[in-house]
Amino acid sequence: MELNAAERRAVFAEINRGAVSHAYIIEGDRGVGKRTFAADLARAILCTGGEKPCGHCSSCRKCASGSHPDLHVYGADGASFKVDAVRGIKRSVSLMPNDGDRAVYILHDAGSMTVSAQNALLKVFEEPPEGTTFILVTEKKELLLPTVRSRGRVIRLNAADDGTVRASLAAAFPRATAAELDEAVRIADGRLGVGMAVLKKEGKAERDSALKLCGAVYGEGSRYDLYGAFLSQTKKREALLPVMDALTEAARDVLVTKLGCGRCCLLPPETAEKYAETATARALYEILEAFAECAMSLRRNTDTGIAASQLCARLTRAKG
Ligand SMILES: [Zn+2]
């Protein structure tokens, strides 16, 4: 079983027939598997073997190890995709491919491109050099200018049913136990990428940190305990951001439990119920907003210490 199997088959069949589009736009919610799909698509386009992606040719192997000279991967720098990055892409596009006659550019977070960056990109989009393919990855295609959107083939990735997610996770993590798979499937809620992150070690460490911090937020502790808990987390921006995303998800769980309007994604349901009892729906909503905004300001490169202090001040106000 494979995620978005029909869509995958159609696109890969076209590529095997030699019909490669100049631009693909991969759209889907966070964690739904966009990165994996974009990487597979690039591999298929650059593959020199029989059934593409063959997985064995030198091109497929270079893609897998991240060393293919004609596979260029870009992403947002801080909060948005800057026009400078697009200028770099344009310079690179004007050069000939190194290995074969094709070059692929994957642009992650393409939806965060500023309007001027999108306009700059539009020029290469309109007249791309022979053999060049762009893969734009975004949560919502509406974030792209209509002129950019209309020039690419849009592939929408949907959340999968639990059975499909479980089968994909079991294949990717053959050593995971049944209990670990159960937990990952519950948290993933149809999003394979989220399930993958749960089973990877890093994902687990972040979730554990988030669960511990939840105790400080929703528990009985004093304001000083709260500051202590968060300020001890500020040493590494790269580590704090995923923890903040996990906290946002946990706060959402508590709120939907309070309102009785959805299922828990990250917290065990009994924990969410316990936390939901500690405050009014309005306060729980403010806590959720405080986490979401802290994550946003970390993405904007705000100093981690400042972001954490602002967060604690908001949490203290929310708790009243
Ligand atoms: Zn190959």
Image (cartoon, rainbow, N blue to C red):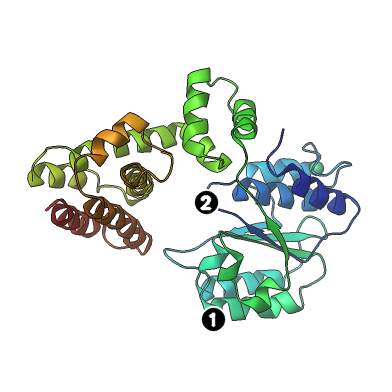
Residue found 72% across the figure and 52% down from its top: 42
Cβ of mark 2 under 8 Å from ligand 1: the answer is: no
The residue labelled by disc 2 is 30
Of the 4 image quadrants, the one containing the N terminus is top right
The type of residue carrying mark 1 is Ser
- Which residue of the protein is positioned furthest toward the right in this rendering? 17
Q: The residue tagged with tag 2: helix, strand or loop?
A: loop
Residue found 63% across the figure and 30% down from its top: 163
Q: Is residue 298 left or right of residue 59?
A: left
Q: Residues within 10 Å of mark 1 (few under 14, many from 20)?
A: few
The residues bearing labels 1 and 2 have C-alpha atoms spaced at a distance of: 25 Å
Q: How many marks?
A: 2
The type of residue carrying mark 2 is Arg
**Ligand 1 picture quarter:** top right
Residue found 58% across the figure and 69% down from its top: 142
The residue labelled by disc 1 is 116
Q: The residue tagged with tag 1: helix, strand or loop?
A: helix
Residue 71, percent from left and from top: 68, 55
Q: Is residue 256 left or right of residue 227?
A: right
